[in-house]
Image (cartoon, rainbow, N blue to C red):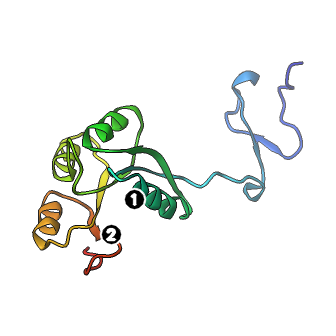
Amino acid sequence: MERPSTPGPGTADEWTGAPSFMRRRLPLDPMTTTRPEPKYRVIVVDDSVIDREVVVGVLTSQPGVEVVAMARNGYDALEKLAKVRADALVIDLSMPAMGGVELLRRVREMEAAPSVLVVSASDSDDDVRRMLTNDAAGFIRKPGTTASVTP
């Protein structure tokens, strides 16, 4: 059954004069339409399965955050980035194969690079400085360490 070419009650044509198959019916009252909340897409990178799950749990408990992938090291993270769009990476500093420093350098070279937040058990101020001077958005020490958040 073909749609009528004239708008029905409670709707308005977005494109006046367009053929009926190109018309989109919009409610007159914008309060009757709900839009999905935009999601902040994140990839979690950590060699520890337990730490990955903890970070994913914290992130997914926040409205508007979607974890789109998890990776076990830098190489795995780069493969995931080639397949899915991410707004941010939450990465561990120390990982086998490719660690956080090298991953951060490679991500920084990408066009439209996602933000990178480093979460690490390292207590070294040198590690913090090294990550922040390589354009990390921030550095958070994992629970159980002596220091807290560094902006």
Q: Are marks 1 and 2 in contact (CB under 8 Å)?
A: yes
Q: In x, y percent, where is residue 100?
A: 21, 52
Q: In x, y percent, where is residue 80?
A: 37, 37
Q: Which residue does the image show at 59% across and 55% down from the upper left?
A: 37
Q: In x, y percent, where is residue 3?
A: 85, 24
Vertical placement of 63 versus 3: above or below? Answer: below
Direction from residue 58 to residue 96 in the image, left or right: left
| Picture quadrant of residue 84 | top left
Q: Which residue does the image show at 25% across and 75% down from the upper left?
A: 150
What residue did someone put label 1 on?
Answer: 51
Q: Amino acid at mark 1?
A: Asp
Vertical placement of 9 versus 148: above or below? Answer: above
Helix, strand or loop for disc 2: loop
Q: Which residue does the image show at 89% across and 43% down from the upper left?
A: 9
Q: Amino acid at mark 2?
A: Lys
Direction from residue 106 to residue 29 in the image, left or right: right
Residue nearer the viewer, 45 or 110: 45
> Quadrant where the N terminus lies?
top right
Specify the farthest residue to the top: 1
Residue nearer the viewer, 48 or 64: 48
Mark 1 crowd level (few <14, some 14–19, many ≥20, 10 Å Cα): some
Mark 2 crowd level (few <14, some 14–19, many ≥20, 10 Å Cα): some
Q: In x, y percent, where is residue 117?
A: 30, 60
The number of discs equals 2
How far apart are labels 1 and 2 at the CA level? 9 Å
Residue nearer the viewer, 13 or 55: 55
Q: Which residue does the image show at 48% across and 61% down from the upper left?
A: 59
Mark drawn on residue 142? 2
Helix, strand or loop for disc 1: helix
Q: Point out the tag, 1 or 2, that comes first from the N-terminus.
A: 1
Vertical placement of 77 versus 138: above or below? Answer: above
Direction from residue 113 to residue 63 in the image, left or right: right
